[in-house]
Amino acid sequence: MKTLSTLHGAVLASLLSSTALAAELTVPSGGSIQDVVNQAAPGDTILVEPGIYHQSVYVDKPRITLRGLRDGDNWALLDGEMKLNDGIIASGHSIVIDGFRVTGYKGNGIMTQGANNFEISNNYVEGAFYGIFPQFGRNGLVIGNTVTGAEDAGIYVGMSDNVDVIDNVAFGNVMGIEFENTRNALMAGNHVYDNAAGITLTLVPGLPVKDAYSQVIRDNRIIGNNHVNFAPASSIAAGVPSGTGILVVGPDNITIENNEIADNDNVGVFVADLITFGMDSDPKLDPYSDGVRVMGNTWRGNGENMNGMLAEMLAATGKTGIEVLAMGKGRDSCVLPGDGIDTLGTRRWQDCLGDNSVAGFATARLEGGAEEPEYTLEQKGRLTYLAVCTGCHAYDSVLHGPSMQSIQAIYDGDPSGMVGYITDPVRKREGFPEMPPQTYLGEETLDAIASYILEDLGK
Amino acid sequence: MTRNGKTVALLATCAALLGTALAAQTGSVLSDLESEEVRARYRAEAAEKIACPRIEGYDALMAAFEKNATSKWDRAAMGCATEYGARAMDELSLPTNLIWAVATFRTGNIETHLEVLGAHLDYFEVLDQSYSAHYQGVELAAELGLRWEQARERAEGLMARIDPLVSKLNEARLLRAAYLLASTLRETQTDAQNAAVATAVEDLQIAIGENPEALDGLGPLLLGQVLAVLPEFLGGDILAAIALLEQAHALNPTDLSVHHTLVEAYLGERETDKALALLKQAVGIDPVAENLQDYVDEMKYLGGLALRAGAPELARQMGEQRATVLAAHQQLDPRKEMAALGHGGADPLTGKKPEDLN
């Protein structure tokens, strides 16, 4: 079996790869994935044998395929043992991350950061804060993954463009699948059940990307998303009302079509403005959800068991069993009159027209792919600081580790001292967990992070 | 009356959707920090950190209050100032009978009480702005939570003494409404928030009926803010809100917090021309007419609105004026927005900072 799947991987890789000379490297069971990544050249495929890997992996080379091999239930298993923060982080363009089982990370299961033309496929990610999290990516595909147990979003596409999220399964997360500050994206064929909220489409304040628009949500099954919201109370996700099929907060030009939306206790589709959630701190954002089209979906048993904050809010109206709830000042939204659904707050909505249909919309990705700019050291420093260090450090407060302000004071003018510490951390503070070494990021990136922290951050 | 408490900004109503989470399952960095033990430790540290030096006697307390009651750039100083103010009020009797108050020359006591309450409202607003837009670190969360609780406890004490005056004194009614809105912005359960907003709306309607001009038009400003935010099926009414905010603007044309809300309401109604006209007026307002911290905060906000309204040149101008005031007054807080848990901070690709107005 093993040889067969290896062979299969090899053939696929050589088909996908753009360089004829691409090599195939193998990580033996339990070996260091990072070592092999470091040896690899752009275009190479890295096969990871089934086994257990207590590691964080960082890929910043372009066109690397990282593939976990599987032998029945025996996966290439990345296990952070609840000590490590990140499973796989990639900022190389045209990265493929395929076939891993990922568990026990405190931050990100699989993250791409600034990687264009990415593909994340056939992984099984459990736990973590964000399960699968492509951020700042253009042109990407998230397909065939299963994600569960994320304290925020299971699959979380953030500040990205032209992304397809297709045929994934998300259950037992706070949010099943989220598009956040994302433009041009397709979510299709996913099965999203038993999350606190199934699908969330959001525009979040205070991020570098100031808009979110043109998203197609079609042919998904969004069933029984009534899990208690187990997001940490201090996180934004704690405000997401459990029992919600689809939550739209802020983006424009959204089509929700041909989905099966059933048994979500509070509401099928909830369209709100940023202000509804107290998320209106960023004046640069247009806080209204405009152009939301809800058409041709199958509905069953939504809003039949209202509870919690939404029940409290709507108590005065005496309404339950609502399929579409609108609570904002958005314009140009519509439902299809023939769908015969119960709505509330849709006084300004219109009737959808047949030609609003996007039933045949096949992909949001770009023909020919996106450009692949090479990042400067400065950009790399900022990208990895954001992806990795902010998982445990905030600027002016203790998070998991001490505040960056206090760290700036310790290492003022001494970047190599800082690099020394993060390469080989020692226990210094009473009552703090240990900081895991960051060597996997490589010397060049660590230098870039240190100079960003000491010379630019907060200055 | 002081200008304190006039700028009570946003309203909680719907932010009330924020619920309390149950215990987390997976042990992320944030959920580790939710543990009772960790929180108790940071609360104890915060309590020590925010304790104010002891001051005794009415005059000394009032002097310490006056010194920092409007230091909006320094929540620690403001926290102690409001504490001193509240303690001074403990030493002051407050007549509940207005005729008796006039007869005994103690109307001043009433004003002082309202002034100290107003300072608390400003303090709530400063605290509200200190929360990060995304994720709180545990240290900051513990500090802000404790500050909020302590401020609310003090303000409740003041309110208990002011309450009997509400039916006789319009200003007291207005400040009660402002208090209800400001003190429930954070750290409050949904049902308590909803109840506070409902009571505040009633108070505001009565107060505006009696005299819309009281406290420079605070009534129309607050009610306008509330009606602009509430969903229609819960009594919200954007057109009524705009009429109220226009009234507030006419009564108090140099208050940037009125510009802030009214521009936002115009943009919500896609009345971009009206929004731009108001933004142009705002950029011409003399900074010394405002609390300087309010000025730089509002310039940042209005500059953002100008960008959204498609007026980058106006935004740039606001950014420059803001920078000039910040440079001349180093004590002011630039309110940097920094990243946590993968969110916020500078744009990693361009290096642009969130507060940049270009």
Image (cartoon, coloured by chain):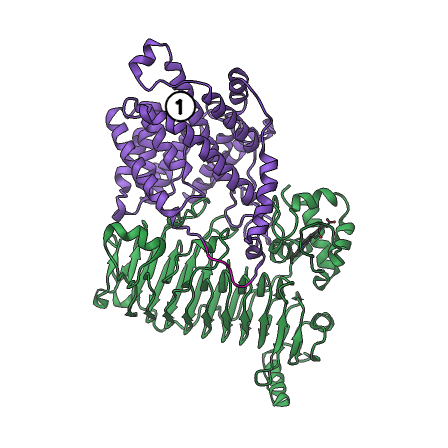
Chain colours: A green, B purple
The quarter of the rendered structure image containing the C terminus of chain A is top right
Residue B6 sits in quarter: top left
Residue type, label 1: Leu
Question: Which residue is at a point 50% across and 55% down the rendered structure image?
Answer: A232
Residue A213 sits in quarter: bottom left
When the figure is inspected, residue A298 is found, relative to residue B137, above or below; the finding is below
When the figure is inspected, residue B177 is found, relative to residue A279, above or below; the finding is above
Query: Please, which chain is the residue tagged with disc 1 on?
Result: B
Check residue B24 for magenta coloring: yes
Nearest the eye: A325 or A227: A227
Question: Which residue is at a point 37% across and 37% down the rendered structure image?
Answer: B181
Q: Is residue B320 left or right of residue B211?
A: right
The quarter of the rendered structure image containing the N terminus of chain A is bottom right
Nearest the eye: A330 or B34: B34
Question: Which residue is at a point 49% across and 35% down the rendered structure image?
Answer: B150
Answer whether residue A290 is visible to the viewer in this image.
no
Question: Which residue is at a point 29% across and 60% down the rendered structure image?
Answer: A324
Magenta segment, which residues? B21-26
Q: Is residue A56 left or right of residue B159?
A: right
Q: Which residue is mark 1?
A: B114
In the rendering, at what x and y percent does residue A189 appear?
41, 74
Answer whether residue A279 is visible to the viewer in this image.
yes
Check residue A166 for magenta coloring: no
When the figure is inspected, residue A417 is found, relative to residue B261, above or below; the finding is below
Residue A93 sits in quarter: bottom right
Total marks shown come to 1
Look at the numbered disc 1 and give the secondary structure of its residue: helix
In the rendering, at what x and y percent does residue A381 appear?
67, 54
In the rendering, at what x and y percent does residue A78 appear?
63, 72
Q: Is residue A333 left or right of residue B336?
A: left
Magenta-drawn stretch, dominant element (helix, strand or loop)? loop
